[in-house]
Amino acid sequence: MSVFFSFFAQLVDHLAELLQPLFHASSAAAAIVLFTALVRLLVHPLSRASARGQKAQAALRPRIAELRTKYRKDPERLQKAVLELHAAEKVSPLSGCLPNLLQMPAFFLLYHLFSSTTIGGEGNGLLGHRLFAAPLGGRWSDALADGGLFGAAGIVYLGLFAVVAVVAGFNFRRARRTGGADAAGAAGGALGGGEPVPGIAAVGKVMPFLSFGTLVTVAVVPLAAALYVVTSTAWTAVERALLLR
């Protein structure tokens, strides 16, 4: 495993060297943004498939409602009929989860690299890189301790928080417009219950607010991992807006 981390650290260093003429001291940060874009491009075919699955799922809702009415007194038969409908239409209720799951290893890789003082038995040179005045291995708490909220490093985090807030606001408005509760109701229908799943309506109301949880992630993880999260979140917002328009 240490060999793999060493290889990835060298990859980030090489990308930073290539980008150094353009981004100077922030070249490693630019390399992480580029790495994030490459990961998202690799996952993009799955994102397209996920979007098609969501559209197909929405198209099935009237038919699922008909099945719920038809088999309202037979929950087991309803569940079977719903599963058969999904199978016949080749629609997976869980298709939207795969793109997000496949990105997790990249996030944890960056988290590990910028949380370790050594890699392969040698000092971790990546920790010397910065995004403007903020060390890529530092956290928001470090920035607050060194200069305060409006210190040089603190301002970098305020910029990231602003980007996350804008993206979260965009996602919130879009979720409200498309109806987060409807999505939750569709999930309840997919489970095959004749009655709504307990608490599913509450989940639907909470879902539009979940994007703001990224603010907490950015605040507590190393800046390199936070940069990955911010870039990936912004990419997801634009990608979904285009694919689901």
Image: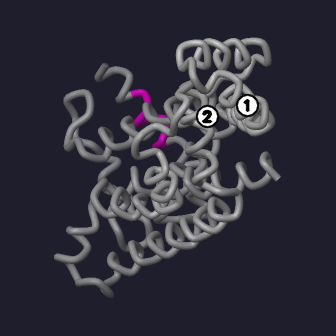
What residue sits 60% from the left and 28% below the top?
190
Horizontal relation, residue 151 to residue 94: left or right: left
Q: Answer left or right for 58 relative to 115.
A: right
Q: Residue 6's spot in the image, x, y percent? A: 36, 29
Kind of residue at badge 1: Gly
In terms of depth relative to the viewer, which is nearer, 60 or 23? 60
Q: Looking at the image, can residue 94 be seen?
A: no
Residue in the foreground of this view, choosing between 125 and 108: 108
Q: State whether residue 64 is above or below residue 218.
A: above
In space, the residues marked 1 and 2 are separated at their CA atoms by 8 Å
Residue 96 in the magenta stretch? The answer is no
Q: Which residue is mark 2?
A: 96
What colouring method underlies this structural image? one colour
Magenta part of the chain: 7-13
In front here: 129 or 229? 229
Where residue 217 is drawn, which disc sits there?
Answer: none
Residue at 80% of width from left, 36% of height from top? 59
Q: Is the residue under label 2 in contact with that under label 1 (CB below 8 Å)?
A: yes
Question: Quarter of the image containing the N terminus?
Answer: top left
